[in-house]
Amino acid sequence: MMQYKGYLARVEFDDEGDVLHGEVLNTRDVITFQGQSVQDLHQAFRESVEDYLAFCAQRGETPAPPYSGKFVVRLSPDQHRLVALAAKQADKSLNAWVAERISQDAKRELDQRA
C-alpha cells in the first residue's frame, strides 16, 4: 500500500505493458497513476492526488474525503442481538465495540497478508 495525504493506493504490475499501475482505493472518485520504476510510481501517485485536489478546487468542489468514518452494516436480528449483548458485557457502546473488533480483525488480516 502507498499513502499520501490520507489517500491509500494499491499497486499492480502490468506484465504486458511492463509498467506499474496504481489506483487510489479510499475515495469514491477515480484516481489512477503509473510508472516504470518505484520512484516514478511514488512521484506519479503524489502528482495524481495533487491534480485531483487542484481539479476539485478549480471546480469549487470539496474533494471526496478518503473516508467519512461512517458506514452501514446490515445484520440479522440474531446477529444484532449477539453484538449488542457482547458490547454490553464489555461495558462499551455498540459503536465502540464494533469499531474495536473491526480494527483488530482488519489489522490481523493485513498482517497475515504482509
Image: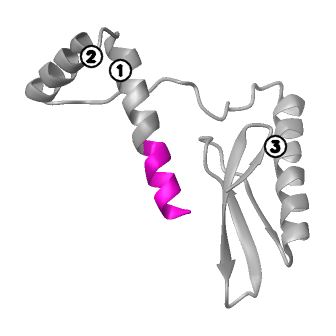
Q: Which residue is mark 3?
A: 52
- The answer to which of 47 and 54 lies nearer the viewer is 47
The residue pinned by badge 1 equals 97
Do residues under tags 2 and 1 come within 8 Å of each other at their CB atoms? yes
Decide which of tag 2 and tag 1 comes sooner along the chain.
2
Q: Is residue 110 magenta?
A: yes
Q: Position of residue 18 (x, y in %)?
A: 76, 87
Q: Amino acid at mark 3?
A: Tyr
Residue 43 highlighted magenta (yes or no)? no
- Which quadrant of the view contains residue 4? top right
User: What residue lies at 35% left-to-right and 20% top-to-bottom?
Assistant: 97
Quarter holding residue 52: top right
Q: Which residues are magenta?
A: 106-114
Q: CA distance from mark 2 to mark 3?
A: 40 Å
Q: Secondary structure at mark 2?
A: helix
Which circle, 3 or 1, is nearer the viewer? 1
58 over 42 or under it: above or below: above
Q: Earlier in the sequence, mark 2 or mark 3?
A: 3
The x and y percentages for residue 16 are: 68, 91
